[in-house]
Image (spheres, coloured by chain):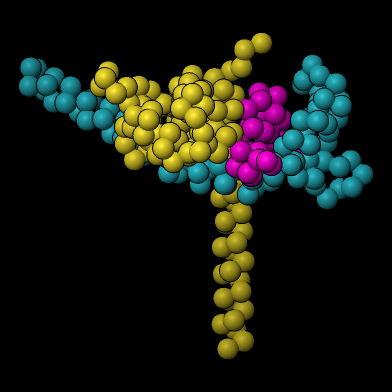
Chain colours: A cyan, B yellow
Amino acid sequence: MPLDPLSVKFAALADPTRRAILARLALGETSVGELAKPFDISLPAVSKHLKVLEKAGLIARGRAAQWRPRRIEGDGLREVDAWLENYRRFWDQSLDRLDAYLQSVAHDADKTS
Amino acid sequence: MPLDPLSVKFAALADPTRRAILARLALGETSVGELAKPFDISLPAVSKHLKVLEKAGLIARGRAAQWRPRRIEGDGLREVDAWLENYRRFWDQSLDRLDAYLQSVAHDADKTS
């Protein structure tokens, strides 16, 4: 059974090297050779990671055919963000509770000072 | 080499059954038996998925020891969200561009009407 698109994206993100490649691409279009430089892995290994990211729709190839730069695919992570949106209230709630606690501490401090 | 925490989270999310379990838990604390019901998989298979989610810090065990309910771990996805934050501008930019385009279309329509 082929994986659904969202699973493919999450699986692609479950690798620190691939996330580091995305972080580099977030600075701008970059050639494969340039992308490989900071990593202690071979060019074919980098190409393999790029293929995984491309299949997941997280990166795309730029228009300059000669050096074939890769770039972030803007819409790629939007789907991940949309999924996450359903759960945001769980940590927003924790922040609310922390806020309420800090306010009660401040209130108590006011009373004792 | 053990995976970093963020990779463990992404790997845990790269499975539609595990995401469905999270969606069910988003409705409230749920026992393992109850969680297994909508899925055409065995109880041990569900337990295995729960273990993956728990190791990733995405769910936790509730306090009622007898039925050992699972619940969403509020902070679990916050780290994923924090990572995503660095990339949000990429799809926000696409929205900005769409907005600019729609405004220019509306502007042209004003001129020709």
Find out whether residue A13 is within the magenta segment. Answer: yes
In this view, A96 is above or below A80: above
Residue B56 in percent (x, y) is at 50, 22
Q: Considering the image in quadrants, where does the N terminus of chain B appear?
A: top right
Which of the image's four quarters has the C terminus of chain B? Answer: bottom right
Question: What residue sits 64% from the left and 44% below the top?
Answer: A5
For this orientation, the residue located farthest to the right is A66
Residue in view at x 66 percent, y 25 percent: A15
Image quadrant in which you'd find residue B59: top left
Q: Which residues are magenta?
A: A1-29
Could you tell me residue B98's position as x and y percent? Answer: 60, 61
Q: Nearer the viewer, residue A27 or B73?
A: B73
Q: Horizontally, is B103 left or right of A86 in the view?
A: right
Q: Residue furthest left?
A: A111
The residue drawn where x is 22% and y is 25% is: A101
Residue B81 rendering spot, x and y as whole percentages: 49, 34
Give the quarter of the image for residue B14.
Answer: top right
How many numbered marks appear? 0
Q: Is residue A41 visible?
A: yes
Query: Would residue B83 be seen by someone viewing this image from the given angle?
Result: no
How far from the left and from the top, in percent, is residue B73? 38, 27
Q: Residue furthest bottom?
A: B113
Would you say residue B89 sits in the magenta stretch? no
Q: Considering the whole magenta stretch, tell me its main secondary structure.
A: helix
At 13% from the left and 19% from the top, the residue drawn is A109
Q: Nearer the viewer, residue A65 or A75?
A: A75
